[in-house]
């Protein structure tokens, strides 16, 4: 796929490019439009400690370059990229290196959520390290049945937390198979994360979705609860619903766009194809034409 020009073009719809400079160029353009960025160096499930250390090094460079270019951007990373499959100690040491640098430069470090095989380990490590690194942020997925409980615990911690629908294939015992249930769970998550007790505890939610009804709900819920516009943010992915950026910014809402870069785009790209059948049809038409 990598060698087909039509495939490469389509991948570039969702991925800034192979190098950090590509992602930072996009971040600078977003910043000029009043939009913050989160930069992801693509990669997951590394198999050697050297690869895990290299991933952490890449994020240190991300932080250096963000500071040097004075961008409004933060890293967003996956724990299996930092070596979670190789043991918690390896992953923890790598995450601490990135978190410490982020803390020194005042940047959040957002820890993405992966498949349910990693939910407990990811949230446990997040909660333990956040006592030292107050700049760490985490993610919960509305499709998981457990998420309402995780949200309550994170509210107790005053966490910085992204709410997304969830992008992995999960069995029905642990995740809602029906999209309507996922959306309802997401709506309940909005209500809890913006509730007065959550705000009083210092919770900072990021609502990551391109679903206009849920974006609107977040906005209406915040307004009804008197939550100031700087106490939460909306988040989207690079290449999806760019048309919503300007109206959301014009409405005075904080918006962050996650910008991925790197050569290891296969998993990320496949998740973007899988969550929207129309993408798949478009992709194959492009390939045939190419
Ligand atoms: C900033 C950010 C960070 C994320 N981090 C994580 C994470 O850590 N862990 C995780 O599991 N998931 C993560 N996700 C992915 C998320 O879980 C969903 O898979 C993804 O956002 C699609 O769901 P949706 O909320 O946009 O709603 P949907 O109901 O799927 O889509 C709503 C509308 O958005 C548009 N849209 C959605 N997806 C696409 C697409 N691929 N291509 C084109 N248009 C599309 C369409 O117009 C669609 O009608 C993240 C998403 C965002 C925005």
Image (cartoon, rainbow, N blue to C red):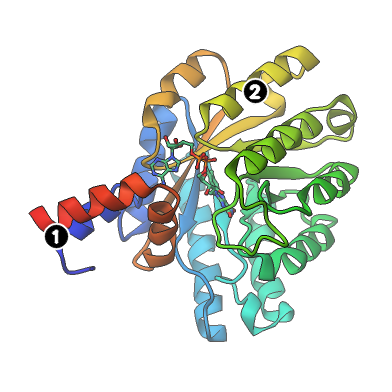
- Residue that appears at 59% across and 21% down: 216
Please, which residue is most extreme toward the left here? Answer: 289
Judging depth in this view, the residue of 288 and 130 nearest the camera is 288
Q: Position of residue 161 (x, y in %)?
A: 71, 44
In the shown orientation, is residue 147 left or right of residue 261? right
Mark 1 packing: few (<14 Cα in 10 Å), some, or many (20+)? few
Judging depth in this view, the residue of 49 and 86 nearest the camera is 86
Q: Please identify the quarter of the rendering in which residue 265 is found.
A: bottom left
Q: Which residue is mark 2?
A: 217
Q: Please identify the quarter of the rendering in which residue 33 is found.
A: top left
Mark 2 vs 1: CB contact within 8 A: no
Q: Secondary structure at mark 2?
A: helix
| Residue 150, placed above or below residue 123 | above
Q: Position of residue 233 (x, y in %)?
A: 62, 31
Distance between the alpha carbons at the discs numbered 2 and 1: 40 Å
Quadrant of the snapshot with the C terminus: bottom left
Judging depth in this view, the residue of 164 and 94 nearest the camera is 164
- Residue that appears at 39% across and 47% down: 24
Find residue 163 and name its label: none
In the shown orientation, is residue 27 left or right of residue 218? left
Q: Which residue is mark 1?
A: 5
Evaluate whether residue 261 shows in this view: no
Q: Please identify the quarter of the rendering in which residue 231 is found.
A: top right
Label located before the other in sequence (2 or 1): 1
Q: Secondary structure at mark 1?
A: helix
Mark 2 packing: few (<14 Cα in 10 Å), some, or many (20+)? some
Camera-side mark, 2 or 1: 2
Task: Count the labels in the image.
Answer: 2
| Residue 74, placed above or below residue 5 | above
Evaluate whether residue 99 shows in this view: yes
- Residue that appears at 9% across and 53% down: 289
């Amino acid at each position: 796929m990598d060698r087909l020009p039509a495939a490469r073009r389509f991948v570039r719809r969702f991925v800034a490019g192979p190098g950090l400079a590509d992602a930072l160029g996009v971040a600078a353009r977003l910043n000029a439009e009043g939009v913050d960025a989160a930069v992801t160096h693509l990669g997951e499930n590394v198999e050697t400690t050297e690869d895990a250390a290299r991933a952490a090094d890449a994020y240190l460079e991300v932080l250096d370059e963000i500071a040097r270019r004075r961008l409004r951007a933060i890293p967003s990373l996956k724990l299996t990229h930092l070596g979670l499959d190789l043991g918690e100690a390896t992953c923890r040491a790598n995450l601490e290196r990135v978190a410490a640098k982020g803390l020194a430069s005042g940047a959040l470090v957002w820890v993405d959520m992966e498949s349910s095989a990693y939910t407990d380990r990811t949230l446990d490590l997040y909660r333990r390290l956040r006592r030292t690194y107050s700049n760490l942020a985490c993610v919960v997925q509305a499709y998981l049945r457990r998420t309402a409980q995780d949200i309550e615990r994170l509210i107790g911690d005053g966490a910085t937390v992204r709410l997304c629908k969830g992008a992995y294939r999960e069995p029905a015992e642990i995740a809602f198979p029906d999209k309507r249930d996922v959306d309802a769970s997401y709506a309940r998550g909005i209500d809890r994360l913006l509730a007065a007790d959550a705000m009083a505890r210092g919770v900072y939610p990021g609502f990551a979705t391109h679903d206009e009804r849920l974006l609107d709900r977040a906005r209406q819920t915040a307004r009804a609860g008197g939550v100031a516009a700087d106490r939460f943010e909306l988040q989207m992915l690079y290449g999806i619903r760019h048309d919503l950026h300007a109206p959301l910014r014009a409405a005075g809402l904080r918006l962050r766009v996650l910008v991925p870069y790197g050569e290891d785009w296969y998993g990320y790209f496949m998740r973007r194809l899988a969550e929207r059948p129309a993408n798949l049809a478009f992709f194959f038409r492009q390939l045939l034409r190419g």
